Image (cartoon, rainbow, N blue to C red):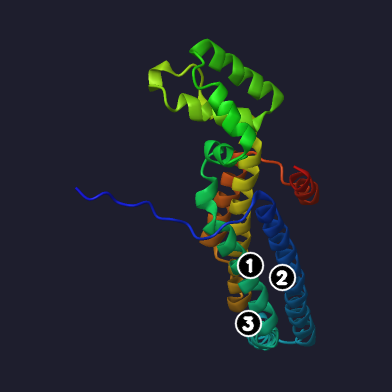
Amino acid sequence: MAVKNAALASNWLSATDLIQRLGRARENRDQYAKMLATLEGQVTQRRTDVERSLADLSANERSKIVTRAVNGHRAELRRKSADARVALVREAGRLRDEATAVRVHYQSAMQCLMRESLGSERRSRLLGQIANSGPTELASLASYAASTKDKELGAALCTRISMLPIHDRPFSAHELADTLVGEDHRRVTQAIMETERIAIETLHSDSAFETGRTNLTRNLQTAIMRREEEKVGADLSDLDALTNNNGEE
């Protein structure tokens, strides 16, 4: 029976890269929102001006003329702002594509931990030193690694117990990985999710401006996406601090 080869990802971004992509996505979103607010303000002003000039007409006649005037003004603004709006929508999409393309590298805290210090001399030495350690010693070292946030030791221990039968493993490798890099993994996961949501929200906002109508189904979709982000539970309120901290590590 033929064995199916795993698909290999050709893209890579570090955790710092992903946090920076999110920062740029937020800036792009804010720039787009500011532009859209200005355009919608002009539409609203046009409506107000036309309504004021038609005070002597009946409500039905006034409504028809106002609708026609506002739609015409929106179409004019749509044409004039098209290039700038499309550029921001495309930038949001580009950032989303870059972020989501590397999601495969951040599927679990364990995956992230095993990538830590890969190929380091110390990790290799540690693995050799614990090659014959028994369950009690391995469990004790796992507690020590968790307490001291020693990722190299944690990665070596996870490698070591992966060689043991599942029922003989003295600690949970996934729990150790979560203790050591779980918060980092959650931040990256949420950064990818938010970058993706921002792109979709920007596209939806542009569609709403184009048509002059809000799509409630699309709003519900992004609300669900936002709720899923909140479930991850990472703190992404200060991206500059996160970027600086990651750079120092």
Q: Position of residue 243 (x, y in %)?
A: 76, 50
Q: Is residue 61 left or right of residue 11?
A: right
Q: Position of residue 15 (x, y in %)?
A: 65, 49
For the point 60% across and 50% down, the residue is: 226
For the point 65% across and 19% down, the residue is: 144
On screen, 143 above or below 70?
above
Kind of residue sitting beneath label 1: Ala
Please identify the quadrant where the C terminus is shown: top right
For the point 80% across and 47% down, the residue is: 241
Mark 2 vs 3, N-terminal side: 2
Question: What's the mark number on residue 32?
Answer: 2
* Residue 42 in sight here: yes
Secondary structure under the numbered disc 3 in the rendered image: helix
Q: Nearer the viewer, mark 2 or mark 3?
A: 2
Q: CA distance from mark 2 to mark 1?
A: 10 Å
Q: How many marks?
A: 3
For the point 39% across and 22% down, the residue is: 166
Other-residue count near label 2 (Cα within 10 Å), few / some / many at <14 / 14–19 / ≥20: many
On screen, 45 above or below 205?
below
Q: Looking at the image, do the residues carrying marks 2 and 3 touch, with CB atoms under 8 Å apart?
A: no
Q: Is residue 238 left or right of residue 188?
A: right
Other-residue count near label 3 (Cα within 10 Å), few / some / many at <14 / 14–19 / ≥20: few
Kind of residue sitting beneath label 2: Tyr
Q: Nearer the viewer, mark 1 or mark 3?
A: 1
Q: CA distance from mark 2 to mark 3?
A: 35 Å
Q: Position of residue 193 (x, y in %)?
A: 59, 52
Question: What's the mark number on residue 137?
Answer: none
**Which residue position holds label 3?**
60
Question: What's the mark number on residue 92?
Answer: 1
Secondary structure under the numbered disc 1 in the rendered image: helix
Q: Looking at the image, do the residues carrying marks 2 and 1 touch, with CB atoms under 8 Å apart?
A: yes
